[in-house]
Amino acid sequence: MNKNKDYFWIGYSDLMTAMFFLMLMCFVFVTKYDKDKISTIKKEVTVLKKEKAIIESVQTTIKKEVTVLKKEKAIIESVQKNIEKLKDKKDLFLYDSRFKRYTLKFDVQFRTGCFRLDEQDVIYFNKIKHKLDDAARELKVVIDRLDYLKQHDASYKNISYLIVVTGSASRIGRDDVNYLLSYQRAYYLYKYWKNDLKIDFDAPKYHNLVEFQIAGNGIGGVGRFPIEKKGFSRKNQRFIINVIPKFGEL
């Protein structure tokens, strides 16, 4: 009987020892699993923090770029509105929305083969003289406004205008002569403004504000009057004025 009891306790002890080792193995396994899991989570947290930092950096960059773009947009709109003030001078300028340019609203009709701006070369010159004067003064207002902006706001440092005064001729006489005449008419408009009004858009003081060009498109160009016969032939003898903003590094 005692012998059987001894067997029981020996078996019981072996069972407890086995269970102890089993629990120990489970503990070691769970501990290692938790340690690996925690390590993985820490790595993931580190990666997420880095990604968050990158996202925040990108968001900050985007916000700065949006701010810059808004400022640049405001500058562009300001410069454009300054030009568009010419539209308000309806007796002087006609804006052609199709070709994005201005023409003088009043007729400047040259006698055949003529190009100077005086009574001998232009029909009814004395009646339109004051309008030519006013047109130059209004262009000067636009340029002076840009000059003011550049002096008071560094954002306008690289802003300027391209002003192109183009002469156009009608189909009277030889085509090659008309191309020369159209340029000469634009050139003499520039000379008239310079000599009579003392407004020289090509003067050194305007060189950081305006790139001034004189051109002649002869019987070519877009937006011409299609009918060229008696009573209409001189309609294409006109001045076209392009005022184009140049935004530099923008």
Image (spheres, rainbow, N blue to C red):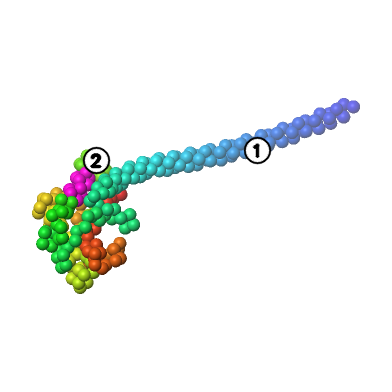
Image coordinates for residue 139, horizontal then vertical, percent: 20, 49
| Residue drawn at (22%, 64%) of the image | 234
Q: Residue furthest front?
A: 231
What residue is disc 1 on?
29
Mark 1 to mark 2 CA distance (whole Å): 71 Å
Instruction: Give neighbour class at mark 2: few <14, some 14-19, many 20+ (Cα, 10 Å).
Output: few
Q: Quadrant of residue 212?
A: bottom left
Q: Which image quarter: residue 22?
A: top right
The image shows residue 69, relative to residue 19, as above or below, that is: below
Residue 67 tag number: none
| Residue interval drawn in magenta | 134-147
Q: Is residue 45 magenta?
A: no
Question: Relative to residue 168, is residue 21 drawn left or right?
Answer: right
Can you tell which of label 1 and label 2 is closer to the viewer? 2
Which quarter shows the N terminus? top right
Q: Residue at x 33, y 54 (%)?
A: 97
Q: Main secondary structure of the magenta part?
A: helix
Q: Earlier in the sequence, mark 1 or mark 2?
A: 1
Q: Quadrant of residue 99?
A: bottom left
Residue at the outermost top position: 2
Which numbered marker is on residue 153?
A: 2
Q: How many marks?
A: 2
Tell whether 56 sits left or right of 5.
Answer: left
- Who's the residue at 28% across and 55% down the image? 101
Who is closer to the viewer here, 192 or 64?
192
Between residue 41 and residue 21, name the one nearer to us. Answer: 41
